[in-house]
Image (spheres, grey):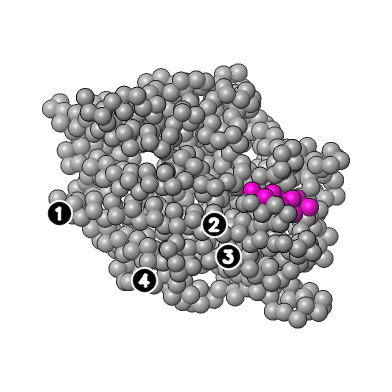
Amino acid sequence: MSSSSTMALANPLLDPWTGPAGGVPPFDIAAPGHFEPAFEAALAEQVRAVEAIAADPAPATFANTLAALERSGRTLDRVMAVYGVFTSTRNDEAMQAVERLIEPRLAAHRDRILTDGRLFARVKAVHENRAGEPLDAEQRRLAWLHHTTMARHGAAAADTAKRELAAINRELAELFTTFTQHVLADEESQAVFIEAESDLAGLPEAVRDAAAEAAASRGRPGSWAIPNTRSTVEPFLTHAARRDLREKVWRMFVGRGDGGGATDTNATVARILALRARRAGLLGFPTHAHWRLEDSMAKSPTRAVELMQAVWTPAVARVREEVAEMQALADAAGAGIRIEPWDYRFYAEQVRRATYDLDEAEITPYLQLDRLREGMFSVAARLFGLAFRELAPGAAPVHHGDVRVWEVVGRDGAVVGLWYFDPFARPGKRSGAWMSDYRGQERLDGPVLPIVSNNCNFAKPAPGAVVLISWDDAVTLFHEFGHALHGLCSAVTYPALGGTNVARDYVEFPSQLLEHWLSVPDVLERFAVHHQTGQPIPAALVAKIERAKRFNEGFRTVEFLASALVDMRLHLAGAAPIDPRAFERETLAALGMPPEIAMRHRIPHFTHVFGDDGYSAGYYSYLWADVITADAWEAFEEAGGPWDEALAGRLRERVFAAGNTVDPADGYRAFRGRDPSIDALMRKRGFTPR
């Protein structure tokens, strides 16, 4: 027996999971050295299974083709679940080496399956139902999905095109890994250190404490550090009185991946764009954007761009108004400055105080992370009948001591899944906030319960200290929990159709909708509790928050849309060679980008778009989904409030539980009774409807 076979037999990643909820990932005993032999065994296992399906001499049926295909790769799914956690939250040098090795192999493996002509012929036969089987709606949807996926990845292409496509996908996998690791390196290695306490002027106590803890963890006790991550940078830019320090922190943050050294990503981006353009041509599409959007709700780049342009114009007009207010305030204070991007959040906060008598620092003491988490649980209980019960430490293995695990229970008392929560930033963990599926819900061969996680990058406090977060971070917390509920509420038969496996421009709808429940008055009154006095947030302060909810909407919209429009134009450029720096500069100028604002994600660190193919030519999805979100929230307002039982029931059944078993447009109509209207989005953002 070979040494690799011996390692595979002893590999915990290959064993069936044990523990609660039908088994959990073995995070406590997994190590970087386990991954290569585990992938070798798991990939080979799926290849054998797919080969048996493709070579089956019997006529293609749903059972011997699609159901069998859904069963293939279960071991690989388990390995991928742990691999995904290690590469996103424990990405040290050892894991980065593993990632560089494994990603091209995974790309080759996917191509081998998706471009297998024999397999495609059988999938096509089931899709066309040549056997005349009595397929139900979910089975027909699964047949459509597999057929569409294989066709879009070149299953019907000539062999020479398939070979070139495979080479492109392998190289892209390497480039995505390089891009992500370079951005992570900049985020981990860079911070602005502050030595004098007087330079902290304007910062709330919670921000100061987090900065002190960040400096201590970097070997600089007695100093303060602003790490290069959004959850620490944005509060600093909002409150710090020292303008030169704001500029320094801002430049650090927007300069990720653009430093000109070993971690510069511009050449990587240019190569990714060239390869994507070539791949689109081989697949018969004019551009990568056309390929990506073919199976989306938007269907075409034209429709996506039309939506973005419809919102861009009034958003830019609103920014001009916001800047005028801020400039007037700065002039009145004798600041002697012109508003720059590192000033925007700071002076916007001053305007909010003056206009709405509302100070972010007045809200933050009520936004305790633990209490807000309980508020999310309360929303899930009232909307969907879900209860969260924390497991005792050790009951489920975790990948870090910060992680806690909850059992999720339905109205009937039955366990419906597990929820993991990993809230704090640390070395090796990518920035931002996200939801992960460790295991998707299905019932192909019996009930399989979902396991999901939410991951954030809040600054870890000193032991025993309360974690206070900003209002924007609280919104993000609810947003990601919406994704988690989408996974937990899934009620499908086939794995490929479950949970968040829906169109990219629909997947953000459930998460963006859940954001609305943060500002529901009775949620705030119960769970926004002052960290020192224990008193609930005053009704007068809640009223101020409600009055100011559209404040700074121009900034938020333009910051996002600039990134979305640049993303789309990059991928509509076809095979034209692109210099990312010049393209970004020239595109923003052509759009009329207000100089006081920067893109939310500049090209050199746009991991949504260049960390994989996921949101490439698809960052617009957040806006598309928000059209649906705004319309859906108005449905609750029309029904009499956020807790309407009948509407919540339809939301769960038609949206959260349905997964990809129905076309998303049909699913939304089944919930709302009609198609969504952009006018609701315009009202939500305070813009003039078309």
Quadrant in which the C terminus appears = bottom right
Q: Position of residue 635 (x, y in %)?
A: 63, 44
Q: Label 1: which residue?
A: 160
Q: Label 3: which residue?
A: 252
Choose the circle earlier in sequence order: 4 or 1: 1
Residue at position x 60%, y 75% in the image: 595
Q: Is 682 included in the stretch rendered in magenta?
A: no
Quadrant in which the N terminus appears = top left
The residue type indicated by label 1 comes to Thr
Q: Which residues are magenta?
A: 205-217
The image quarter containing residue 37 is top left
Q: Position of residue 569 (x, y in %)?
A: 42, 67
The one of 143 and 206 positioned closer to us in this rendering: 206
Q: Is 216 included in the stretch rendered in magenta?
A: yes
Q: Label 4: which residue?
A: 578
Viewed as shown, does residue 387 lie left or right of 363?
left
Estimate the spatial distance between the alpha carbons at disc 3 and disc 1, rounded to whole Å: 45 Å
Residue at position x 82%, y 43% in the image: 530
